[in-house]
Image (cartoon, rainbow, N blue to C red):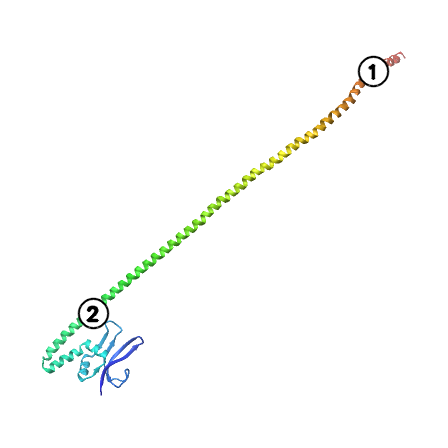
């Protein structure tokens, strides 16, 4: 039976986790397997590989063929390095202690590389985080600056609009003030004109009317005065004559009557 070392998918959608298993070559991918050798999680950097090293070396030495991905994983973990050293021990090139020493040196160097990679990744992550924060800060500053410029432009436009509105208002206000002044001035000028015009018109009328009226009055008045004067003058002339004459004539008459009465 041909055995194969391959990955069996587990986990959830978009975040798979793979089991490293020994299975029959004819079995489906996620079907029945012979033995589980480890776990592979590619969702983090560096990837997590939990592997049963001794069992994996044993199956590799028996001739189990890994898939391409599993071959890269086993090479990364040093399985094929261990297989190579055990082959040298089998050939007598060196003993097991030398093989273990060489393997330990290789593992230490590999772990150092892994640690350097992890530290570099952490530094890069910190730098990326700082760069992201700086970019966000710069973006916020640019956005705030743009908002301030926009607000300043809007306030300037509002001030210009209010200034333009106030300027016509100021121009209209003096115009309105001058218009009543101009209207009142002709009114004041027209009022005396109207008053003087009747006065001038009435004055000649009054002057002419009395003149016309006085002329007949003066003409009639002498006539009236002359008539009574003529009438009164004879009356006055006649009255004394009539009064004096009887007075003189009546006085002796009274005396005669008194003498007659005394004689009697």
Of the 4 image quadrants, the one containing the C terminus is top right
Secondary structure found at label 1: helix
Q: Residues within 10 Å of mark 1 (few under 14, many from 20)?
A: few
- Residue at the spot x=64%, y=32% of the render? 204
Picture layout, residue 98 above or below residue 184: below
| Disc 2: which residue | 117
Residue 36 horizontal side relative to residue 143, left or right: left
Image location (x, y in percent) of residue 1: 22, 88
Badge nearest the viewer, 1 or 2 = 2
Q: Which of the 4 quarters of the picture holds residue 107?
A: bottom left
| Disc 1: which residue | 245
Image location (x, y in percent) of residue 40: 24, 77
- Residue at the spot x=45%, y=47% of the render? 167
Q: CA distance from mark 1 to mark 2?
A: 180 Å
Picture layout, residue 138 above or below residue 201: below
Q: Which of the 4 quarters of the picture holds residue 198?
A: top right
Image location (x, y in percent) of residue 5: 22, 82
Residue 231 horizontal side relative to residue 62, left or right: right
Secondary structure found at label 2: helix
Residue 190 horizontal side relative to residue 256, left or right: left
Taking depth in this image into account, of 231 and 246 the one nearest to the observer is 231
């Amino acid at each position: 039976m041909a055995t194969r070392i391959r990955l069996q998918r587990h986990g959830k959608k978009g975040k798979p986790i793979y089991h490293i298993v020994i299975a029959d070559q004819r079995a489906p991918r996620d079907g029945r397997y012979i033995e589980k050798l480890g776990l592979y999680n590619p969702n983090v950097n560096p990837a997590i590989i939990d592997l049963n090293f001794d069992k994996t070396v044993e199956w590799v030495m028996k001739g189990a063929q890994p898939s391409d991905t599993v071959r890269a994983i086993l090479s990364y973990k040093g399985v094929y390095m261990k297989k190579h050293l055990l082959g040298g021990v089998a050939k007598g090139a060196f003993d097991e202690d030398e093989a273990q020493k060489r393997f330990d040196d290789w593992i230490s160097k590999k772990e150092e590389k892994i640690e350097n990679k992890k530290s570099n990744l952490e530094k890069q992550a910190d730098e990326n985080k700082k760069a992201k924060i700086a970019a966000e800060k710069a973006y916020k500053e640019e956005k705030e600056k743009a908002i301030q410029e926009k607000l300043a432009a809007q306030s300037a436009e509002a001030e210009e609009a209010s200034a333009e509105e106030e300027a016509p208002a100021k121009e209209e206000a003096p115009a309105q003030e001058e218009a009543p002044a101009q209207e009142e001035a002709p009114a004041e000028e027209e009022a005396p004109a109207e008053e003087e015009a009747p006065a001038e018109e009435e004055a000649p009328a009054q002057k002419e009317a009395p003149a016309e009226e006085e002329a007949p009055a003066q003409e009639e008045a002498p006539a009236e005065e002359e008539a009574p004067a003529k009438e009164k003058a004879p009356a006055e002339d006649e009255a004394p004559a009539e009064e004096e004459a009887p007075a003189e004539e009546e006085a002796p008459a009274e005396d005669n009557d008194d003498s007659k009465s005394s004689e009697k």
